[in-house]
Amino acid sequence: MQMVQLKLVTIIAEALLEERMLEAIQRAGARGHSLSRVSGQGTRGIHASDWEGDNIKIETIVSPEVANQIIEHIAQTYFAHYAVIVYTQVVEVVRSEKYL
């Protein structure tokens, strides 16, 4: 069975950013995603989601190039004003054609 290395991009953000985040990853070239409602504590203190509900976690498996586009957009657009984190992991997948 052929395994291919791709990137898992994980974004944790305020729930009010859900639609904008999903549009951004799709524009960058992601072909799918998983979305979860999550809670936790970070360094930013109180943020808008404290009144509007939990945070969201978006996960998508993409090529390294698409991962970089997503990260750059999220960092430039949201880091200064919202509680957002983004990280990547190298993952090995079967059926890589689903992601590329």
Image: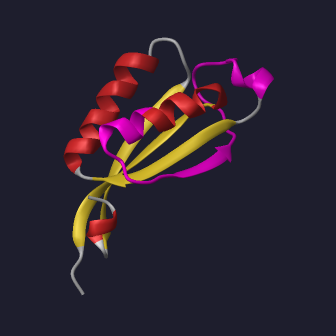
Residue at 29% over, 27% down: 72
Between residues 47 and 98, which one lies in front from this camera angle? 98
Between residues 10 and 70, which one lies in front from this camera angle? 70
The image shows residue 51, relative to residue 21, as above or below, that is: above
Outermost residue toward the top in this view = 81
The image shows residue 10, relative to residue 96, as above or below, that is: above
Residue 91: x, y in percent? 32, 63
Residue at 62% over, 39% down: 56
Position of 38 compared to 10: left or right?
A: right
Which image quarter is the C terminus in? bottom left
Quarter location, residue 5: bottom left
Residue at 67% over, 18% down: 47
Q: Which color mode does the image show?
A: secondary structure
Which image quarter is the N terminus in? bottom left
Residue 71: x, y in percent? 33, 33
Highlighted magenta segment, given as a residue range: 24-52
The image shows residue 53, relative to residue 82, as above or below, that is: below
Residue 94: x, y in percent? 31, 76
- The image shows a total of numbered marks equal to 0
Quarter location, residue 90: bottom left
Residue 73: x, y in percent? 34, 26
Q: Is residue 64 magenta?
A: no
Outermost residue toward the bottom in this view = 1
The image shows residue 73, relative to residue 89, as above or below, that is: above
